Image: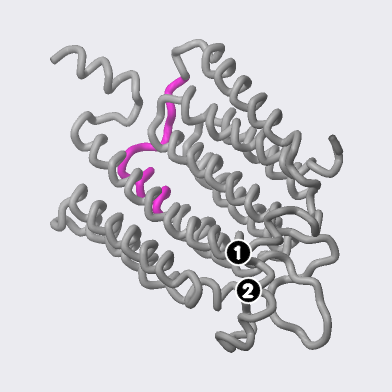
Amino acid sequence: MDWIGQYNYYVVFFLMMTGFYVVVARGNLVKKIVGLNIFQSSVFLLYISMGKVDEGTAPIIVAGEAIYSNPLPHVLILTAIVVGVATTALGLALAVRIKEAYGTIEEDEIHEQDDDW
Amino acid sequence: MLLTFLVATALAVVRLRSLFAVVMLSGIYSLVTAGIFIALDAVDVAFTEAAVGAGIATMLMLGTLRLTGHRQVAPRHSPLLPLLVVTITGGVLLWGTRDMPRFGDPAAPVHHHVAPRYIEDSPTEVGVPNMVTSVLASYRGFDTLGETVVVFTAGVGVLALLGIGGRRRRDEGAEDTDDDGGTRPG
């Protein structure tokens, strides 16, 4: 196993777990969505890291012989970023709606109100 | 170097309780991610991330904070259980990297399936110098159509949740449909 050769992946996993931790351990809904975004962009980084080729350049045709990085992960992540923002918008809209209904976006307080019913 | 900066930003997001600072940091985080994408040759992804991730997402979150308040109460539960879950998951993921190819390895399997065809034939088949564009719009056009459907559904969902009436609510919906139309050419 090559330690330095996979440094990117290790950082990606650390970030992924940081985002996961924020989602699980923090009660504020907006903070949870930020955590979800961190998680999400770490996945993007994972894909883009896989697409990189040594000595490669951006996949745009240049004159002469050139090594290009793999364009396929770029396309997938391009799609994923846009979809990610759409889901973020939906999540935030849910948070606003919950604030209107409960007067708070703290998970614990919402559960307390539910128990009182 | 940039990756280290990214880790620092993420840790600050975990620690901070002022949601305004957290949202600003998530904008910075997106921008640093865009920088890394450029370093990894993904220029199209980088500008989409900078525009959509750092721009629109931050704006949407600021709009939400305006409506929901920007202080977070101190967490009441012990962080031990989440930490345990997260550590185990991370460990499993690390274990999964054991047979992954080295970073930048030209012999990695990901570079030897359909990618060579895209690189070699797309200039003559599609005629667009940017391979990412030709794959996005031509070879994988249906994916992109599906993506449009998802974004449209999300826009409809936001409108349904917030109601059509009310000035500020309509602004929130408008931002979303803006992102629907604005990012299509990318």
Query: Foreground: B115 or B86?
Result: B115
Residue occupying image coordinates x 68% and y 33%: B96
Query: Foreground: A53 or A13?
Result: A53
Give neighbour class at mark 2: few <14, some 14-19, many 20+ (Cα, 10 Å): many
Residue occupying image coordinates x 70% and y 61%: B112
Give neighbour class at mark 1: few <14, some 14-19, many 20+ (Cα, 10 Å): many
- Expressed as whole percent of the image width and height from the top left, the position of residue B168 reads 25, 56
Quadrant the C terminus of chain A occupies:
top left
Closer to us: mark 1 or mark 2? Answer: 2
In the image, residue B68 lies in the stretch drawn in magenta: yes
Q: Can residue A59 be seen in this view?
A: yes
Q: In this view, does A18 lie to the left or right of A59?
A: left
Callout 2: residue from which chain? B
The residues tagged by marks 1 and 2 sit, at their Cα atoms, a distance apart of 8 Å
Q: Is residue B28 visible?
A: no
Question: In the rendered image, which residue does mark 1 sit on?
Answer: A72
Contact, CB < 8 Å: mark 1 with mark 2? yes
Q: Residue B118 carries which label?
A: 2
Callout 1: residue from which chain? A
Badge 2 element? helix
How are the residues colored? Answer: one colour
Magenta region: which residues? B60-74
- Expressed as whole percent of the image width and height from the top left, the position of residue A42 reads 60, 44
